[in-house]
Amino acid sequence: MRKHLRILASDEEQVKANWLVWFLMAAKVAALVGLVNWLFPTAIPYSFFQLWHTTGTPVEWLWASWPILVWAIGWTALISALTLNSRRENYNAEAFYARGLWLSLRAGVMEEVVFRWLLFMWSIAMAKAVDYILGGFIFEHGFVWWFQTTLILPVANFFTMGLLKSVLTDASTWYIAAGLIIANSRFRDGHKYQGLFGLINSWFIGMYFFYLMFTFGLVAAIVVHLVYDVLIFTIRYLDQLQERARGVHKDSNQ
């Protein structure tokens, strides 16, 4: 159950905390987006930095995010109450917390830059291109349009309870919704190491970050993502402290 709360417990997670890896990924996708904008100026319906336009205040961003922030607090507190940490985790609580905060900063900034901005824009262009190849060059729309508008987008709109209805149900801009779904699927897949729960949770959380981005701008998604992760690591840190003070840990049960 604690699998989704591990901090740098595997090589894969350490890679995820590597800023250089993420900078290189962002640079690669940014170059692709720039190339598309140069060769096909109308392929992506946003200028390069348009999604960075910010509205509202940090207080408004956080207030609009109360459902996922309450979820982060409640679920993490429940898991912490039902499980025990290892002796090493409790003994090194401060070091684990510091690494958790560093990971939160990286996730808040780089995951939003890559998935909610650059990969999203690239995915829009790719959805259009593949749709053209798969029938769009003959008919008004191709297979990708049919698959997205008939199956994927209605299901996504249902499970997100209409949160992104204006984006997911607008047939005239289906490629924006398709790009959103593709980019969020990549965001979800980046949490495979957390197991089935991580895959499901990250998909819903990613969709909420897209809602914030469309409503307030990319900076709002970055800030809320950071706060979301910090809350999780803070609750785990408090749990480690109370277990250390009581002298209990899961190793003592073995």
Image (cartoon, rainbow, N blue to C red):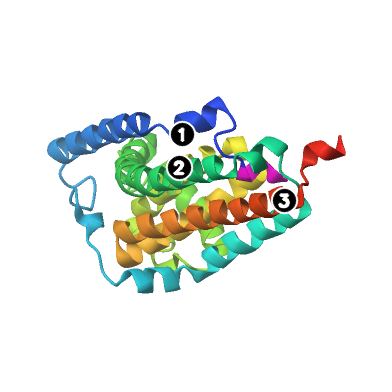
Q: Crowding at label 1, few (<14), some or many (≥20) Cα neighbours within 10 Å?
A: many
Q: Residue 249's quadrant in the figure? A: top right
Can you identify the residue that label 1 sits on?
16
Residue range in magenta is 1-5
Number of numbered tags placed on the structure image: 3
Q: Which amino acid does label 1 sit on?
A: Lys
Give x and y (percent) for residue 172: 33, 60
Callout 1 secondary element:
helix
Can you identify the residue that label 3 sits on?
243
Residue at screen point 22% across, 61% down: 53
Give x and y (percent) for residue 142: 39, 43
C-alpha separation, residue under disc 3 versus residue under disc 2: 23 Å
Callout 2 secondary element:
helix
Magenta residues, dominant SS class: helix
First in sequence: mark 1 or mark 3?
A: 1
Relative depth, front residue between 231 and 111: 231
Q: Which amino acid does label 3 sit on?
A: Glu
Q: Residue 50's quadrant in the figure? A: bottom left
Marks 2 and 1: which is nearer the front? 2
| Residue 41 as seen in the image, left or right of residue 29 | left
Q: Is 236 one of the magenta-colored residues?
A: no
Can you identify the residue that label 2 sits on?
103
Looking at this rendering, what residue extends furthest in the right direction? 254
Q: Is residue 185 visible?
A: no
Q: What residue type is labelled 2?
A: Leu
Give x and y (percent) for residue 129: 31, 37
